[in-house]
Image (cartoon, rainbow, N blue to C red):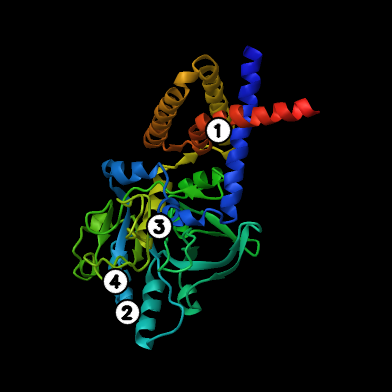
Amino acid sequence: MKKRLILDSIFGTGFIFFLIGVVFKFSAFGIFDVLDPIGDALSDVQITDIVFSKFRGETKADENVVLVNIGTLPRAGIAEQIKIISKYNPKVIGLDCFFADPKEPYGDSLLIDAISQADNIVLASKLYNCSQEKGECDTLIGSNPMFKNKASSLGFANLISEAADQDQFKSNRSSTPVEKVNGEKHNALAVELVKYHSPDKVEKLFSRNNPYEVINYRGYGGLGGKFFSLDVIDVFEQNFDPSLIKDKIVLFGFLGSDFSDKSWEDKYYTPLNEKYAGRTNPDMYGVSIHANIIAMIINEDYINEMSASLGIILGIILCFANVYLFNIIYFKKPLWYDGLTKLIQLAEAILLLFLIIQVFHDFSYKLELTLGIVALLLAGDALEVYHGVIKNVYRKIKAKI
């Protein structure tokens, strides 16, 4: 009996993963396009979003980064902001904006002067035509040379998103610390800024040797956010304590025309979004995302992930254990099979989801149990198909042979 149980459990587990493979294959060919409305609502949802969305209010504000809103200022206005902030000796200033072409000469000259007079200025650049297969990008474009040549260095401001433009669903969960352009390495904007503030922290980031890092979101910039933020008028009126600027990373970028603006421009959906399923409004400006990356690096507050291979192994083990248990119920308590298996599946699924959330919340570690949970939810019904159809078909074929 035990040998029979083990064999049925092995073949039953194999059948379940065969079904998962078939469903995955059909999905790739668009067979289930009828479910697209549901898929679109849930495609970018992860269980760990609940932690960010519901529990991140307890996270402390970060004092290493100061955000400055440039609003819709012309270049002359940005230049004046830089001069004011520079007086209070920040460790480094970053500009999450581009100055591609010459504009009004007076404003351009003021901006050139402000950049050249500041001690450390990092300008944003942008990567184009990046290929995961090649592991590098074709092009890096920065601001016009008359600005770029006055800066201390560049950092690419690209944020990982599958969206091609602002009108599409722009979500962001992770960042790449370094990218290659024609064989030459370039740091991300956040990484380049931290290099001036805490170079040892950048070394620890690189020692992780990860091609990308899941962003451990701390909070928003702007009014009431987790980062000290200055609105346009606050800078011009110098409405801030100078000690909040000294030796800090000051990052300039767009946070709306002012902090009351609810503009969608340069906004992304993040796991902090209160509506973590079926989201409607993007919730975070790009410059705030860079601030979160900076805070993560400085505080070494990284998220570690279970490897895909370990997730597959655990999924197989979890599936086999449940199939073995369900086989015992199938042979010994057939009348109770449907009720008991459904109850076990429900209880286990809830327990596993709770485990994923709790481990992520307490240890910033992402358990990859998706395959195991899917296999678990299929196990009860799939095993009935295995016993009622697959085994009977096998017996008939064997008898004919």
Q: Amino acid at mark 4?
A: Gly
Q: Nearer the viewer, mark 2 or mark 4?
A: 4
Q: Amino acid at mark 1?
A: Ala
Along the line of sight, which residue is nearer the eye, 96 or 129? 129
Give left or right: position of 54 versus 366: left
Q: Nearer the viewer, mark 3 or mark 1?
A: 1
Asked if the residue at tag 4 contacts the one at tag 2, i.e. Cβ–Cβ closer than 8 Å, the answer is: no
Q: Secondary structure at mark 3?
A: helix
Separation (CA) of disc 4 from disc 3: 17 Å
Give left or right: position of 106 versus 304: left
Within-10-Å neighbours for mark 3: few <14, some 14–19, many 20+ = many
Separation (CA) of disc 2 from disc 1: 64 Å
Q: According to the image, label 4 marks what residue?
A: 71
Q: Amino acid at mark 2?
A: Pro
* Disc marking residue 382: 1
Along the line of sight, which residue is nearer the eye, 173 or 320? 320
Question: The C terminus is located in which quarter?
Answer: top right
Give left or right: position of 186 versus 44: right
Q: According to the image, label 3 marks what residue?
A: 290
Q: Residue at x 40, y 42 (%)?
A: 48
Q: Residue 222 is drawn in which quadrant?
A: bottom left
Q: Secondary structure at mark 4?
A: loop
Q: Secondary structure at mark 1?
A: helix
Q: According to the image, label 2 marks what residue?
A: 74
